[in-house]
Image (cartoon, rainbow, N blue to C red):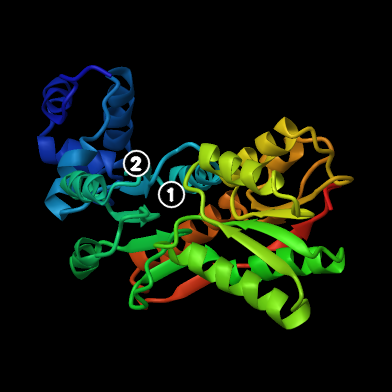
Amino acid sequence: MQQNSTLKKLAEKLQLSVSTVSRALKNHPDISAETKRRVKELAEVMDYEPNSFAVHLRNKTSNIFGIMVPAINNFFYDSFIAAVEQDARLHQYSVLIVQSGESAEAESVNLKLLKNNRIAGIFVSITQETKNIDLFLKLQEQNIPVLFFDRVPDYEVCNRICMADKTAANIAASALIAKNKKNVLALFGHLNLSISKKRLQSFQQTFTSNAPGTNLIIGFPLSVEEAKNITLKALGESERPDAIFCMVDEILIGAMQAVYQMGLKVPDDIAVISISNGFIPTIYNPAITYVETSGYKLGKLAFKRMMSCIKGNTFLQEITLESMLVEGGSL
C-alpha cells in the first residue's frame, strides 16, 4: 500500500471535498451512487485503506485483542491462540500476542504494552508468580474486558474461562482406580496456580473416597527435565509405581523420557494417563490414554464470551468447558 494514498489525494484527483470522499467510502446515504462508484474505483487503484489507528484513537480503543500467555511452547496455548485468531478475523479484529515467561514483572510490562496499543480486550493466562491482579481489574474499570483463561486467579469477581479442572482430575483418577492401580505417581504443576490446586484436591479426594488403600506419590515438577528426574527417582525405588498420572503435556513428556530410559514397557510394566490437549499422547506407541482439555475449544468459548462483553454484557462470571476421557493403550 502506498503510504501517500490519502483521502486528500483522492479528493484532489476527483475534485471533491475530503468529507465527501470520506462519506462515500463509508456508503453514506447522502452521497450519490455514481459518486460512491467513482471514489471506490479510484481508492482501489491507489490501494487506499482507511487509517484505522486514527479512527480508533479517537474512540480510545482499537480493533485489536491482546493475548497474554506464559509461553507459546505447548499445543494447548498454540491451539487456543489459533481459535481466537480464527474468530477474530471473522469479526474484523486483529490479535497481538505477548509472552510473560512465568514472570509477574514481565506480565505487568506486557499489560502496559497492550494498554498503550489501545486493545479492545485481553485474554490472559496468568504466571506462576502472579498474586496481584489489580492492574487487570483497572482495565476492566476502564471498560476494557479482561478474560482470564486456563490459569485463572482465585479472585471470583472477574471473567474466568477454564476447563472443568476438578472433573478432569476425577476422570483420570477414576480410570486408574478402575484398573486397580495401587501405587500411583501423580505429577502436578506449580501450587501457586489454582489449576494445580483444583486438580490435586480432586485427584486425592477421588482416591480417598473410592480406593483408600492406594499409595499416592505426589510430585510438583516445573519443567520437562524436573518431571523426568522425579519420575526416574520414583521408578528406581524398590516399590516402583504401577501407574503415572501427568497433569499437563509438558509433564507427560518428561515422565515418558524417564519410562523409556528405564527400559519399561507401557502398559505391561507401568500404566500412564495424562490430562492433555490431545496431540502429545498420540506420538507414543501405544497412544497414551488422556483426559481431553482442548485449547481450541476453550479459545472458541473465550472468544464468544469476549464478544458478549464487547457488546455490553459485562456481567462477571466463570465459564467452564467439560472434559472427556480419550482411550489409548497405556492403562
Q: With 17 as the anchor, is 123 left or right in this view? A: right
Indicate which disc residue 91 carries.
Answer: 1
- Mark 2 or mark 1, whichever is nearer to me: 2
Q: Which residue is mark 2?
A: 101
Image position, residue 152 (x, y; %): 41, 64
The answer to whether residue 252 shows anywhere in this view is no
Compare residues 139 and 52 and report the one nearer the observer. Answer: 139
Residue at screen point 42% across, 76% down = 317
Going by the numbered disc 1, the residue's amino acid type is His
Q: Could you tell me how many numbered marks the image carries?
A: 2
Q: In the image as oriented, which residue stretches furthest toward the front?
A: 238
Q: Residues within 10 Å of mark 2 (few under 14, many from 20)?
A: some
Along the horizontal axis of the image, is 284 left or right of 57? right
| Side of 187 relative to 265 (left or right) | left
Tell me residue 225's x, y (percent). Answer: 53, 37
- In the image, is residue 33 above or below residue 157? above
Which of marks 1 and 2 precedes in the sequence? Answer: 1
* The quadrant where residue 33 appears: top left
Image quadrant in which you'd find residue 186: bottom right
Q: Amino acid at mark 2?
A: Gly
Whether label 2 touches label 1, CB < 8 Å: no
Is residue 239 visible from the viewing direction of this image?
Answer: yes
